[in-house]
Image: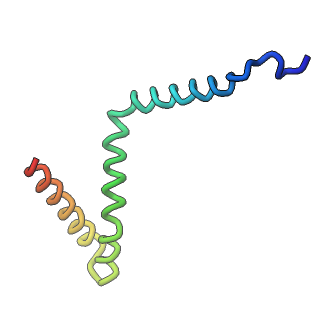
Amino acid sequence: MSKSEHTFPGFKFLIGLASLMIVAAGLRASQTFMIPFLFALFLATLGTPPARYLKRIGIPKIISVLVVALVIISLLVFVGSLL
């Protein structure tokens, strides 16, 4: 008897579905950490090109980062006040 005779056809599907459920449960359990982390990563991704542009035109790095951060914060405050 070969090894494949002992397994039923949907075995790989069930293993994949169980793996997906475990990953989903792990993401659900870590959402209090993951949501702020992913939001910060998103904001950093949005702010990198303007900060690099400001640095390229001769503004010091710390000032360019502060300007971009202030713009992002002011936009978030503005949108939050609209809501």
Q: Residue at x 45, y 26 (%)?
A: 25
Residue sitting nearer the eye, 61 or 38:
38
Outermost front residue: 9
Instruction: In the rendered view, tell whether residue 71 sits above or below residue 10.
Output: below
Q: Could you tell me which quadrant the N terminus lies in?
A: top right
Q: Residue at x 85, y 21 (%)?
A: 3
Instruction: Give the total number of marks visible in the rendering.
Output: 0
Q: Residue at x 30, y 71 (%)?
A: 50
Q: Position of residue 41 (x, y in %)?
A: 36, 52
Residue sitting nearer the eye, 40 or 63:
40
47 sits left or right of 16 in the view: left
Q: Position of residue 12 (x, y in %)?
A: 68, 27
Q: Position of residue 82 (x, y in %)?
A: 8, 51
Instruction: In the rendered view, tell whether residue 23 sits above or below residue 65.
Output: above
Residue sitting nearer the eye, 82 or 48:
82
Residue sitting nearer the eye, 3 or 74:
3
Q: Residue at x 24, y 66 (%)?
A: 68
Outermost bottom residue: 57
Instruction: In the rendered view, tell whether residue 76 sits above or below residue 21.
Output: below
Residue 32 occupies which quadrant of the picture? Answer: top left
Residue 18 occupies which quadrant of the picture? Answer: top right
65 sits left or right of 18 in the view: left
